[in-house]
Amino acid sequence: MNKETIMSIFPEKAEIPPEVMYTPIVQKEYLSGGKLISWNGPVQEVLSPVCIKEGSSVSQAVLGSYPLCTEKEALEALDAAVKAYDTGRGRWPMMRVEERIKCIQDFMFGMKEKQHEIVTMLMWEIGKTFPDATKEFTRTIAYIEDTIEAYKDLDRSCSRFTIRNDIVAQIRYAPLGVVLCMGPFNYPLNETFTTLIPALIMGNTVIFKPAKYGVLLLRPLLEAFRDSFPPGVVNTLYGDGKVIVGPVMETGKIDVLAFIGSSRVANIIEKAHPKPNRLTTVYGLEAKNPGIILPDADIGATVKECLLGALSYNGQRCTALKILFVHRSIAEEFVQKMSDGIAGLSIGMPWEDGVAITPLPEAGKTAWLKELSDDAVHHNAGIVNEGGASVNRTFFHPALLYPVNDSMKIYHEEQFGPIIPVVPFENIETPLSYIVSSNYGQQAAVFGKDPDVIARLIDTLSNQVCRININSQCQRGPDTFPFGGRKDSAEGTLSVQDALTVFSIQTLAAAKMNDLNNRIITSIVRGRRSVFLSTDFIL
Ligand code: G3H
């Protein structure tokens, strides 16, 4: 990619098609206790990663602003959630399954009407391409639908009695209480909802805090949240996490912390809870997923998967391939083909047809990536591809670094961006000891043809990471598959089904079998006197 193309990547306003243009959102309200409350205090201006040219000046588009609430509003939102849960006696946690499903469905219908606004804001706020932004939206809808079906399944499987040792029991899943959900900027809709929706459907009440980037895109949903759920069941926290999250945790009133972000921040938040033993945590954290490319790998197919794995959404996925170990016998050829592959990727703005590489939303990110790349070069790596590591404001051109070794920062740090470090190896122990001594343990990808070699690697890696991908990039989906990680990469396993159990606790009603108890249970069930002790099931 020549430098000129990179330097002239940003459009003039007149060049932006009207159908993809954003409508600024000056958000003045937040949702708390079933009301959209007006905010007249300080606000956070939201800048797009997309810059716009105007004459000789080029600057980040201003998308709008959102409230920078204080500890006071955060604690009010928390109180609303606590009141709605009412120590488990609130309307929401006591509701029948089908009624809760109806609320979630109402919300989903409201959400579907906002697809255009949300997808447009996903492009402008976080620089996601139009196809990927659309996929994030439709994947989230599918996740909600699948969650409803999984919940029905779970409920059906609980609609029966178990008898052991003359004790009859009905075992169900009960809510845990008040959940604080915090999503990441790279999937601000999808990953926020992969915890929010299961938490809600299980009967918990929720406060959710959007990530640092990707905030305004949630604004179109506030009315649907307000209108679909009883007051206080869904509340929002807008503001600086450092100011508002600590005080909320310090109350000890949060029962579940669902957080997708860094382990450093997860630890700070968790430690603020005065009784960590009462806190359930579910985390999706950082990773440095390696690809191991064996000497007999099909180079063409491997390059295709590695490009996808390392550069989809500019490498800003926790599941991205973040380091490639390539057998020395094929390393030169592999690197050349990767370089050709990068040259074939289209760079540009998120709405452009076929675009693959777009500007980055995080402040200071391109400078930091440049630093990582400079450090590698300083330690004798080459930037193999033309234009690699060129920076134009928020845009960073992918850099293929080779040969990388353990003296470089990129060998150890999660780049979460478009840098592909390639480490040549001769002995398989090189990648294996990297994985074993790594702080991360999410996934790995193995590329090769020999079933014996691959079988041995699967067996070794299965005690190191939570998913081994064979001749395939690392990824979370399908969302019904378990998604987790070891060490600093995650806590708890999420999938459509697992999330339901993560946000609930198994609870049973049990009785020694005798005439009196048998009569009581029969009467309760036949008379449909209890929501919990019931053989009703939903179709
Ligand atoms: O950022 C982490 C996401 O969970 C990755 O999901 O593999 O579907 O892109 P994905």
Image: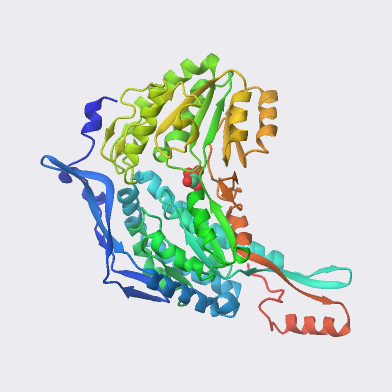
The x and y percentages for residue 58 are: 18, 42
Q: Residue at x 53, y 66 (%)?
A: 179
Model colouring: rainbow
Along the line of sight, which residue is nearer the eye, 508 or 46? Answer: 46
Quadrant for the C terminus in the image? bottom right
Q: Tally the numbered discs.
A: 0
* 365 versus 257 height, above or below: above
Q: Is residue 232 above or below residue 236?
A: below
Residue 379's place in the image compared with 271, above or below, is above
Most distant residue in the left direction: 55
Q: Residue 159: in sight, yes or no?
A: no
The residue furthest top is 329
Residue 530 seen in the figure: yes
- Residue 399 quadrant: top left
Question: Which residue is located at x 41 percent, y 26 percent?
Answer: 376
* Residue at 46% over, 43% down: 317
Please state, as top left, top right, bottom left or bottom right, where the N terminus lies in the image: top left
To which quarter of the image does residue 256 belong? Answer: bottom right
Q: Nearer the viewer, residue 486 or 144?
A: 486
Instruction: Reply above or below: 89 against 290.
Output: below
Q: Give the left or right position of residue 529, taking residue 207 as reference.
A: right
Q: Horizontal placement of 97 versus 28: left or right? A: right
The location of residue 206, given as percent across then percent down, is 49, 68
Q: Position of residue 164 (x, y in %)?
A: 86, 67
**Image spot of residue 247 (x, y percent):** 45, 67
Q: Between 532 and 461, which is closer to the camera in this rendering? A: 461
- What residue is rendered at 41% in x and 63% in y? 111
